[in-house]
Amino acid sequence: MKDLNTKRQSERQLALKKLSIWTISWVASQALVIFGSLLLWPESPLLKIASLSINVLLGIQMILANRHLFKKLDELERLLQLEALAWTLGLTLVIGLAYSSLDIINLIPFDAEISYLVMFMGITYFISLTINKKRYE
Amino acid sequence: MKNKIRDLRAEKSWTQEDLAKAVGVSRQTINAIEKGKFDPSLPTAFRLSKLFQKPIEDLFDFNEES
């Protein structure tokens, strides 16, 4: 049998590797923006803007690498990702706005931090993907 | 959609992994197709047709209501 999968697998591994590199770079740049601006260059707006610009550019590269990886997935894998992303986007929108409203109407004794929303997105995506994989087993 | 992929694969003594490699999808995708939980794309259906040397309509039982 002709092995169509070998090429696909190697391309996917490469795409995954690129995504990992861009993701690590983006996370590192996020730390640089925060800690650099607070500890290393607190008085320099230019360096703050420069570090933030690098952070955004690396983030865009990460998004493009993720898009590239999606193109290397097979049809069922794409469907699983699409469903997981649909749940993540929808729940983040609904829960995120509800969470923000809690803060606005003073029903929580602290500020609504975006970091909680990012954690919520990650957990929602992971759970959705796991459930979808089980559904198609 | 019902299909005969599992039977045809068994006739050739191939594993799901063997078939997945031959048509360029994951083993999980072959498993989902065999169980009728997932309908393959047109290119995958044609690859399966070519591999088993049977027309697509012999592999898949298309029913509008299913």
Image (tube, coloured by chain):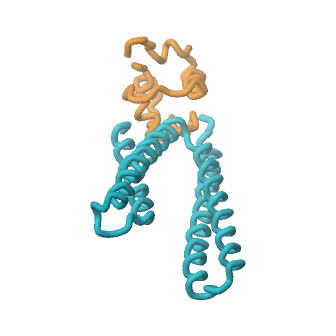
Chain A rendered in what hue? cyan
Q: Residue B13's image quarter?
A: top left
Residue occupying image coordinates x 48% and y 44% = A81
User: In the visual, does A55 lie left or right of A118?
Assistant: right
Residue occupying image coordinates x 58% and y 56% = A16
Front-lying residue, A14 or A116: A116
Front-lying residue, A31 or A42: A42
Number of dots carrying numbers:
0
Image quadrant where one finds the N terminus of chain A: top right
Front-lying residue, B12 or A85: A85
Residue occupying image coordinates x 60% and y 59% = A19
State whether residue A16 appears in this view. Answer: yes
Q: Position of residue B30 (x, y in %)?
A: 46, 34
Image quadrant where one finds the C terminus of chain A: top left
Residue occupying image coordinates x 60% and y 81% = A37
Q: Position of residue A112 (x, y in %)?
A: 38, 64
Q: Position of residue A15 (x, y in %)?
A: 63, 54
Q: Position of residue A58 (x, y in %)?
A: 65, 64
User: In the visual, does A41 lie left or right of A35?
Assistant: right
State whether residue B17 appears in this view. Answer: no
Front-lying residue, A92 or B45: A92
A102 to A86, vertically: above or below: below
- In the picture, one chain is orange; tell me its letter: B
A49 to A16, vertically: above or below: below
